[in-house]
Every structure is written in C-alpha cells, then in structure tokens.
Image: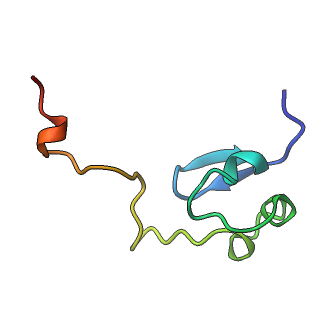
Amino acid sequence: MSLEPSVPCPRLGRKRTTSEHADCPYCFGTQADVATGQRAKFCDFDPARDPVTFGFPDGLSRHRAG
C-alpha cells in the first residue's frame, strides 16, 4: 500500500499517486504541487483541446489485422 496521496487525474478519470502524475505528459509540477490537488499548479490538461491517448489513430493500416 502506497503512502503517497492520491489525486484525481482529469485525463484518465481516476485517482493517481503523486508519482504516477509525473508520468503524465500534461503534469509539470512537483510532487508537492500535485499533492495539493490544485490542478492549476501541476496540470495542463484541457479536455476540450487535448487527446486522452497518444499514438496512431484508429483506422490506420498500423491497426489493421493481418
């Protein structure tokens, strides 16, 4: 069990530890910033503008079977 605080992630729609937020491309603050839960201090995600996943879009030949 982790002793790190869990903070909601708007991109994933679930809570993540302060360390896990560091893996997000939209998080820019320190673990102390994330622990406050004040998104303006650590998160640059805008659901109206930013993608939730990264990589190739569905439907490209990379996703086609066989």
Q: On the rendered image, what quadrant is the N terminus found in?
A: top right
Height in image: 11 above or below 14?
below
> What residue is shown at x 42% (from left), y 55% (from top)?
52
Spot the residue most to the bottom. 40
- Where is residue 65? Give x, y as percent: 12, 26
- Where is residue 24? Give x, y as percent: 59, 55
From the viewer's perspective, tell me whether residue 53 is left or right of residue 41: left
> What residue is shown at x 18% (from left), y 36% (from top)?
63
- Where is residue 15? Give x, y as percent: 67, 46
Residue 64: quarter of image: top left
Height in image: 57 above or below 2?
below
Height in image: 6 above or below 66?
below
Q: Nearer the viewer, residue 13 or 27?
A: 27
Residue 17: quarter of image: top right
- Where is residue 51? Give x, y as percent: 39, 61
> What residue is shown at x 69% (from left), y 76% (from top)?
40
> What residue is shown at x 82% (from left), y 58% (from top)?
31
